[in-house]
Amino acid sequence: MRDREAPETPVWAYDGMVPGPVMRVRQDDELKIRLLNELPEPTAIHWHGSRVPNAMDGSLYLTQPPVEARGSFEYRFKAPDAGTFWYHAPGIQTGQIERGLFGAVIVEEKAPVEIDRDIVLLMDGRPLRANDIAVGTNERLRFRLINAAKARLMRLRFDRHSIRVMAVDGQPAQPFLASEGRIALGPGNRIDLFLDAVLDPGETASIFVDNVGAETEIARLVYEPGTKQRRSPLPDPPPLPSNPLPERIDMRNAQRFDAALNAVDARSRIWTMIGASSGPFGPPLFSVKRGRAVVMAFPNPTDAAHAIHLHGHHVRLLDNLDDGWKPFWLDTILVGARQTARVAFVADNPGKWMIACQMIGGQETGMTAWFEVT
């Protein structure tokens, strides 16, 4: 799963671990993390998908100055949403995420969810050795899947099992069964799924990831012989508890903006957003009053798919005719080649918020813009 032509680079790590330590808190609890920068260059931490206060977002030069070498910074915020999130070095610092500066943030629901085990699977594109996961027949597992690869689409297949998608990008969804046990995650995306282990004791089943057209085994469910967790499977699960996001978005008076993706120089493969500011230093792409609905279109006239991450907000992916939206929230949107993605959200988190974009399938320079909620 690693490019054989890519050179080896020294690992950088949070607390000496790659991935970094899993941070677990309960919804509405406070996270208090002190970053001590022992790197030879500036850094920060972005809390990907977490609707944090603007000053805690970790966007270099936009929401905070860089944490210089031998410097420190304290991140402190309450976790407003239960779900699966992750933390990483800011994308503007080329190479820091790829060196190992990322980890998972798990915000548990206030009331216990009926599962037997909670498993985090964080994927970043490095070679993976298949791990055995011991299970008992009729056990219910919650898998929290995180795609931490900067520019890779992850396609997974769970062999011989039905998997039920319960949350997308940290936000509860109306539960649905994934077709043929297959799911896909764009860069930065997360999916929570429930898997009921319904095979007989002593059996095994694999979890595969697509690796350039061929499947690679990344884990095995190994059923303990002679053991059943319970006599029969649990009934179908109810939806996870809702997070404090709007139930409806009134788009009649929404502010509307287009941000087309474009290649400035096909030879150098540098990409820009048409009409966007240049990173965190130029003027905002747009400014909107707090509480107003926003509709954004991302036309992609290029031959490459792109992943777009909105900081501080979650969005609904709109249907083509504005007559509805997908039944889940997103903070990272995949825009296919020569396609247009349209999203809607309520600008309810004040401050300056980054929009980051990365081409799929390459390590070329990404692009950033920002918008302001006043």
Image (spheres, helix red, strand yellow):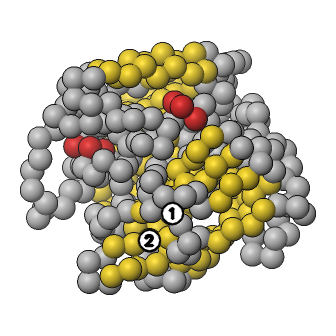
Q: Position of residue 72 (x, y in %)?
A: 32, 21
| Relative to 28, 174 lies left or right | right
Quadrant where the N terminus sits is bottom left
Q: Position of residue 242 (x, y in %)?
A: 76, 34
The crowding category of the residue bearing disc 2, from other C-alpha atoms within 10 Å (few below 14, some 14 to 19, many at least 20), is: many
Residue beneath disc 2: 272
Tell me the element at label 1: loop
Q: Position of residue 258 (x, y in %)?
A: 65, 71
For the image, the number of numbered tags is 2
Residue at 77% x, 48% y is: 289
Q: Is residue 155 visible?
A: no
Q: Is residue 287 visible?
A: yes
Q: Earlier in the sequence, mark 1 or mark 2?
A: 2
Q: Given this view, does label 1 or label 2 mark the residue nearer the observer?
A: 1
Residue beneath disc 1: 277
The crowding category of the residue bearing disc 1, from other C-alpha atoms within 10 Å (few below 14, some 14 to 19, many at least 20), is: some
Distance in Å between CA atoms under marks 1 and 2: 9 Å
Circles 1 and 2 in contact, beta carbons < 8 Å: no
Q: Position of residue 168 (x, y in %)?
A: 61, 47
Tell me the element at label 2: strand
Q: In the rendered view, tell whether residue 102 sits above or below residue 276.
A: above
Residue at 85% x, 69% y is: 323
